[in-house]
Amino acid sequence: MEVCKTDMQKIIKYLDDAARMYDNHPGQRNVCRAWVIRQLIKKLNKKLVVTSK
């Protein structure tokens, strides 16, 4: 099974929405979850840029 560029973009958008949701909730646990999700988004964006060249 291959993951195409549009699939990756949808995944990144979904993760970004999840990070924003966690940011809107109080508590250190939610802040940490949002941070981890954003780190994953950065990693996926790097992979997306490298593979699309």
Image (cartoon, rainbow, N blue to C red):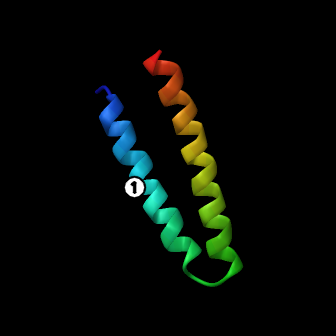
Residue type of the residue flagged with mark 1: Tyr
Tell which residue pokes out farthest to the bottom in this image.
Answer: 26
Q: Residue drawn at (46%, 55%), measured in percent from left and top?
A: 15
In the rendered view, does 52 fall on the left or right side of 23? left
Q: Position of residue 51 (x, y in %)?
A: 47, 20
Hey, which residue is sitting farthest top in the picture? Answer: 53
Q: Is residue 29 left or right of residue 49?
A: right
* Residue at 31%, 26% in the rendered image: 2
- In-front residue for pair 2/51: 51
Q: Say which element carries label 1.
A: helix
The quadrant of the image that shows the N terminus is: top left
Spot occupied by residue 20 in the image (x, y as percentages of width and height): 51, 67
How crowded is the residue under tag 1: few (<14 C-alpha within 10 Å), some, or many (20+)?
Answer: few
Residue 4 placement (x, y as % from top left): 32, 28
For mark 1, what is the residue? 14
User: In the current view of this chain or complex, which residue is farthest to the right?
Assistant: 28
